[in-house]
Image (spheres, rainbow, N blue to C red):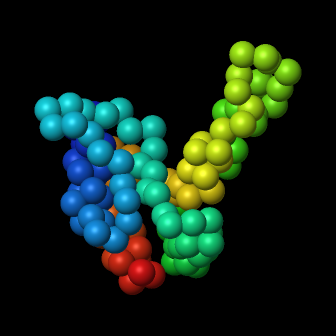
Amino acid sequence: HELDAVNRVADRYTHELEGVVTGPRVRPGFLSSWAQYSILLEDDRSRDGLRAYLKSREIPANIYYPRPMSSQTAFKGINCVRMDAPVAENLCRRVLALPLHPYMSEEEQSKVIREIKEYF
């Protein structure tokens, strides 16, 4: 089952990267459909440095939301949206999505984990 498989991949990231980077958490007894597995880094320099390092090792890591929703063109001019979002802006500068899918092999994931640990 794909949902179980992607949760196994996410659980392994969470377990193996604990104490290295800050990862997302799912409450015990619950599952996630995991659109992304985004880690939170100290700042944009750390995030960008790790991203470049992973890319040099042929590991795709993405920044899916470089700007908060309140800064997106689709919301421009809408009065009900608060445009000053310092927390969201800060988080957008610090998150990086790791490769994640239900068919990810243990070997593929081991490489990602190993390289992140090596970087730090």
| Left or right side of 59 for 9 | left
Front-most of residues 23 and 55:
23
Quadrant holding the C terminus: bottom left
| Left or right side of 63 for 77 | right
Residue at 62%, 72% (x, y): give it. 45
Does residue 106 appear in the picture of this structure?
Answer: no
Residue 60 falls in image quadrant: bottom right
Total labels: the figure holds 0
Is residue 6 depicted above or below 32 in this figure? below
Residue at 69%, 44% (x, y): give it. 67
Residue 85 falls in image quadrant: top right
| Left or right side of 77 for 65 | left
Where in the figure is residue 31, as x and y percent of width and height? 24, 33
Where in the figure is residue 106, as x and y percent of width and height? 26, 62
Residue at 41%, 49% (x, y): give it. 37
Is residue 80 depicted above or below 36 in this figure? above
Where in the figure is residue 38, as x and y percent of width and height? 45, 51
